[in-house]
Image: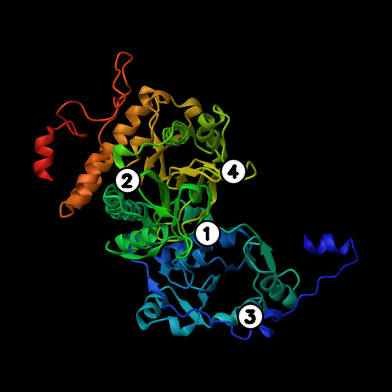
Amino acid sequence: ELEKVLSAKEITVVLEETNLIDGIWQERPSNPTSPLRLHADKWAGESASDKLKKLRDEIRGMGADALLVSKLDDVSWLLNIRGADIECNPVPLAYAIVEMDQVRLFVSSEKVSDVVRGKLEESNVAFYEYDEVIEGVKSVVREGKRIAFDPATTSIGLKNAAKEEKSDSFIERPSPIDMPKATKNEAELAGMREAHLRDGVALAKFFAWMDALTKKGETVSEYVAGAELANFRAEQSGFFEPSFPSIVGEGPNGAVIHYRAAKDTARGIKAGSMLLVDSGGQYECGTTDCTRVYHFGGDAAQPTPFQKEVYTRVLKGHIAVDQSVWPENTPGHVLDAYARRPLWEGGLNYLHGTGHGVGAALNVHEGPQSISPRFTNQTPLKEGMICSNEPGYYEDGQFGVRIENLLIVQPAETKHQFNDGKYLKFERLTHTPIQTKLIDLDLLSESEVAWINTYHQEVWEKISPRLTDEPVALDWLFDHTQPIEKPRPDDDDASAGVGPAAGEDVNGKPIEAATSAA
């Protein structure tokens, strides 16, 4: 496309085989050398050999003899390997060429242990150095094979390598790996569920720690808070690294959508602070991504009416997406308006998508599905896909709100099946309390209140058994999962609407018994 545009202006694009920047970058760091690791069969759910067998059927269907795999997460998913070459993404720098009888894997040999090599050789994987990929493409073409690749993710240099050998030697097609990678199998979903339970423990410990310090009148910098959050996650079994740099934004910094605190300029978090925390973890079994907003200081510090209104409208949109049911083959953009309607009704909006795909122990942003206003993405939401649900609102210079859970697309049981069609719904993965202090109960319907109470009961039941040795976090979790109710018209108590039924906890049990068990 660039060549066409420039040629109209009599400008010719000259492709250089070497990177001109390399000639002047005198202190360029060397390529990363993190070792490859095997992704356990327990969490992969399907062997590399079985994945390759299915992929080869797709390659034949394209009329090709081989497939060039350029996306790092595609290579990782296909061969059940993981790496640590890219910060926060458990992938190695590698290419693969899948042929009918073998796979050529282009990766630095110093990253490949004998264990990894032996396992991959079971799937007839041959190893080449990373910088041999251009010659590898040419070699495949010289053998008389047609090679397919995804033009959206393949460099022009690799395309030209095939083209120079033979002009009709390549086929441009969307990646046949995208959809099987996006539609998780049962083992991958089990891993994602386990990862979110571990993450729920870490987040409960973090917010309990923050809550205790701010109630004592202490101030914690955003930078320190982010470091402590990473430490709490690191305590969890199978944790490798964050799934992206944590966003810990106090007050006006919470309105900066991709804010990253710096040590020297971080704001302080104290009683009265409104804090947005968007963070996630990479675990051996899965990948997490969660956003919560908390107003610190207990009952002594209260949010403004506008903060409560905005938070509640964002929450209403979050609930609407969570509860949605839709016919199969519906693209994600159809659900986007569900999240925005409560904000639109108040003359508010946000300028990012509502949801993105998430990999299973892979990249935290994964396609091809999304929930956003980008109507050009017609990818349907399919059973087994994972999406985020993260509406928000950002008041520039003051505060930001975003509430994010990850969701699994699952079959829905409906009373009717029009045209014998299948319907879909969401299953929640994330288990972290949503602060009720920030809710304007007058804006919620009874069904929305019921959703919040049900969600918090689920959080308590799933996370509390893992906090029996953490009394501070357990008490915090108990306090933040209590049921709420809309105030009655004749109730003049300003605090009405929050709290359990008299003498009962979130599970309907006597408070004394629950406290004793804790």
Tell me the CA gap for discs 3 and 4.
Answer: 47 Å
Q: In terms of sequence position, does the residue under pointer 3 or pointer 1 come before the other? A: 3
**Marks 3 & 2, CB-CB < 8 Å contact:** no
Q: Amino acid at mark 2?
A: His
**Marks 3 & 4, CB-CB < 8 Å contact:** no
Q: Amino acid at mark 1?
A: Ile
Q: In terms of sequence position, does the residue under pointer 3 or pointer 4 come before the other? A: 3
Tell me the CA gap for discs 4 and 2.
Answer: 26 Å
Q: Residue at x 48, y 63 (%)?
A: 262
Tell me the CA gap for discs 4 and 1.
Answer: 30 Å
The one nearer the camera, 298 or 3, is 298
Point out the frontmost of discs 4 and 2.
Answer: 4
- The residue singled out by tag 3 in the image is 139
Q: In terms of sequence position, does the residue under pointer 4 or pointer 1 come before the other? A: 1
Q: Is residue 284 shown above or below 376? A: below
Q: Position of residue 195 (x, y in %)?
A: 32, 55
Task: Indicate the secondary structure of the residue bearing disc 4.
Answer: loop
Q: Is residue 60 left or right of residue 110?
A: right
- The residue singled out by tag 2 in the image is 431
Q: Position of residue 220 (x, y in %)?
A: 36, 56
Specify the label residue 177 is tagged with: 1
Q: Amino acid at mark 4?
A: Leu
Specify the label residue 351 is tagged with: 4
Task: Indicate the secondary structure of the residue bearing disc 2.
Answer: loop
Q: Residue at x 43, y 73 (%)?
A: 123
